């Protein structure tokens, strides 16, 4: 029998502690009718040993024969998923035990909404809470925010299977990152309805290995490209000024780019 929920978790060079905590947080969900699809690209630090001791049939571990990319890992996981509801999760974050239950309850109570995410509790390398990152809650506010930034926490998202069946997965024709922002923008521009839950359902780990100056510059380039493709016609003057600032930031010194990106990662925060 197919599971109710499929959680897709791409991983490369898994951190032994963070990866174990991430997987355990999914298997300990209050809704047990789920499968965890782990798509791993080969690296010197395989996740096989970490997973071998779990003894949980709900874990499906797929190892690619060669290095691919995050979008390809993500898309392979979705193609393998059998659930009616699909979740995305990152290998260094932690899902609260009631995450899946809360999101299922919301989607069942709101049949007009197809994608739901939540606020994030930002934690440091040791797991200590740093801040709460909040996002707009209503579809209308979420759509307005797309013009300036991504209002969907990717590691906390759940969506109905029909969304994937209709729109497919992330882009694989561009080397730039931030494919999640492009995908959610594509959905929103096509009329898919979104929501965010106000309580943090995922602990988002902010650590030195997660933000690198070389990737930050490409992330900003990708963000600018997505805005130009989907949102330019709806932008306010302030939205256009933000876009101009991002274009300028691409050419700034790496240290300034990284500092600005770290601030953006913690924007809309409430100190804990």
Image (spheres, rainbow, N blue to C red):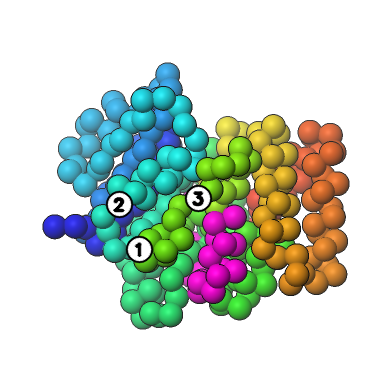
**For this rendering, which residue is in front, 204 or 163?**
163
Query: N-terminal of the two: label 3 or label 1?
Result: 1
Left or right: 174 as drawn, with respect to 241: left
Left or right: 227 as drawn, with respect to 7: right
Q: Which residue lies under the disc numbered 1?
A: 161
Residue 240: x and y in percent read: 82, 63
Quadrant where the C terminus is found in the figure: bottom right
Find residue 32 and report its image quarter: bottom left
Label 1, secondary structure: give it: helix
Q: Which residues are magenta?
A: 181-203
CA separation in Å, label 2 and label 1: 9 Å
Label 3, secondary structure: give it: loop
Q: Which residue lies under the disc numbered 3?
A: 170
Picture residue at 61% right of the left edge, 34% below the top: 208
Residue 186: x and y in percent read: 57, 62
Residue 252: x and y in percent read: 85, 38
Picture residue at 85% right of the left edge, 70% below the top: 237
Q: Are marks 2 and 1 in contact (CB under 8 Å)?
A: yes
Let me know if residue 199 is in the magenta part. yes
CA separation in Å, label 3 and label 2: 15 Å
Tell me, for residue 81, which label it has, or none: 2
């Amino acid at each position: 029998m197919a599971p109710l929920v499929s959680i897709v978790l791409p991983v490369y060079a898994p951190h032994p502690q963070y990866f174990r905590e991430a997987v355990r947080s999914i298997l300990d969900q209050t809704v047990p009718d789920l499968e965890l699809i782990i798509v791993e690209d080969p690296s010197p630090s395989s996740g096989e040993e970490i997973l071998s001791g779990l003894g949980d049939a709900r874990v499906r571990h797929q190892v690619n024969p060669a290095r691919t990319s995050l979008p390809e890992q993500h898309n392979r996981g979705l193609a393998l998923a059998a659930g009616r509801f699909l979740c995305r999760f990152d290998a260094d974050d932690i899902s609260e035990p009631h995450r899946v239950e809360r999101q299922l309850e919301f989607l069942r109570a709101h049949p007009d909404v197809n994608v739901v995410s939540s606020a994030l509790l930002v934690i440091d390398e040791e797991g200590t809470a740093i801040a709460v990152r909040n996002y707009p809650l209503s579809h209308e506010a979420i759509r307005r925010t797309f013009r300036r930034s991504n209002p969907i926490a990717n590691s906390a998202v759940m969506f109905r299977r029909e969304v994937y069946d209709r729109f497919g997965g992330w882009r694989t024709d561009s080397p730039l990152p931030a494919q999640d922002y492009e995908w959610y923008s594509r959905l929103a521009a096509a009329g898919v309805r979104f929501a965010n839950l106000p309580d943090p359902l995922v602990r988002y780990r902010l650590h030195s290995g997660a933000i690198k100056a070389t990737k930050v510059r490409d992330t900003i380039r990708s963000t600018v490209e997505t805005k130009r493709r989907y949102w330019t016609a709806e932008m306010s003057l302030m939205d256009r000024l933000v876009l101009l600032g991002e274009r300028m930031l691409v050419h700034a010194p790496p240290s300034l780019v990284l500092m600005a990106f770290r601030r953006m990662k913690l924007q809309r925060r409430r100190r804990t």
